Amino acid sequence: MGEVDISGQLDEVLGLPDQLRDALWRVESAGLRPHDTPGGLVVAGMGAPAVGGSLARAVLGDRASRPIVLARGYELPASTTPDTTVLCASYSGNTEETLAVYEAAQALGARAVVVTTGGKLAEQARGHGVPVIPLPAGFQSRAAVAYWLVVSLEVAGLCGAGERLHAEIDVAAEHAALLAAAWGPDAPEESLAKTLAHGLHGTIPQISGAEVTAPVAYRWKTQINENAKSPAFASELPEMCHNELVGWEDAKQLGQFSAVFLDDSDLHPRVRQRIELTRGLIASRGGATFRIESIGQTRLERLISLVLLGDLVSLYMAVLRGVDPAPVDASESLKAALNGG
């Protein structure tokens, strides 16, 4: 790990329990007051900030009393009204899509909240008197997933879109610390995270989730993309059973593929049955398959267990490939090209 993980991404992943607690403190220190917005919550962000919003929505589930919508682009959802809270999330504070959504929220007169380390977003928000939740510097944005999740949950609670889960977050942090010890680099080679990394190494993984685990499947995909510098894809059951499953018929002739299914006790019984049947069909066509059950009592604990596991698997895959997980050269090159660089 030390030879490959030059910038210490592993420490950031293993620090997830402390980050959950720190995120709570940062929301409290921002001095946000409850402000009921009947229009619900829009979480505006790209990459990891958007994942945090989708995870928060999954955690709340039927405890969400108003719509929680994601804005992954330059525009607000058409349903946004002045009675909507818009959480604008950007680690650098210079994400052009999020800046565009912030400006749209200001023009509409919607209540805005900003979470960032600084940049143009913080500057504009403070100039407009918009609350800013400050994030610690020095992270990769994707490594700050605990902050994105907790901030989204807390803002949802403050604007009346969902229940406050302050106590559950504290307990989930303790649970995550136990899992980090069980799956960390000092764990045996047969530990779950290392076993999965070896099983997925050299393949193109397809990560599938359903209902509450669907956003976690997407998180696994993006972490493998960015940390392991490897293609990976995500899908959602039961939809994948109606189309994508057919595409596995000749997969073995095209390359090395693998399938991971993220399971949870809250999934519909028929979906859980579909996972096992689908896994069997893929395995019969030569694909390596894995079924991963979430661990924990509350939905928050269980989803965090899957997030932590996926993050560690992606780092171990990077080590097996011998690539530094930190750089994201292709994304930086695209940003430079868009800016005329």
Image (cartoon, rainbow, N blue to C red):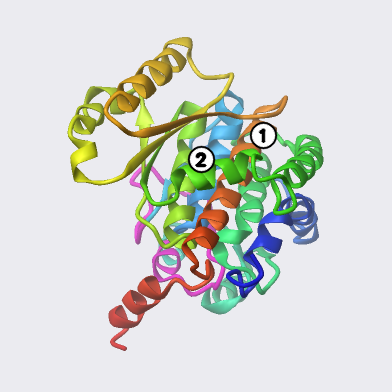
Q: Quadrant of the C terminus?
A: bottom left
Does residue 121 sit above or below 45 in this rendering?
below
> Residue 227 placed where, x, y %?
50, 61
Q: Quadrant of the N terminus?
A: bottom right
> Residue 93 placed where, x, y %?
54, 72
- Marking on residue 219: none
Callout 1: few (<14), some (14-19), or many (20+) C-alpha neighbours within 10 Å?
Answer: many
Does residue 123 sit above or below 232 in this rendering?
below
Asked whether disc 2 touches disc 1, contact meaning CB atoms under 8 Å apart, the reply is no
Q: Secondary structure at mark 1?
A: helix
Nearest-to-viewer mark from 2 and 1 = 2
The residue nearer to you, when weighing 136 against 310, is: 310
Which segment is the magenta one? 73-101
- At a point 19% along the width and 29% down the height, the residue shown is 249
Relative horizontal placement of residue 90, taking residue 2 as reference (left or right): left
Residue type at the position of mark 2: Val
Tell me, yes or no, whether the highlighted magenta stretch contains residue 321. no
Upstream in the sequence, badge 2 or badge 1? 2
Residue 141 in which image quadrant = bottom right
Relative horizontal placement of residue 174, taking residue 322 as reference (left or right): right
> Secondary structure of the magenta portion, mostly?
loop
- At a point 60% along the width and 33% down the height, the residue shown is 59
Residue 251 in which image quadrant = top left
Q: Is residue 83 visible?
A: no
The residue tagged 2 is 216
The residue tagged 1 is 300
> Residue 246 placed where, x, y %?
20, 27
Tell me, yes or no, whether the highlighted magenta stretch contains residue 96. yes
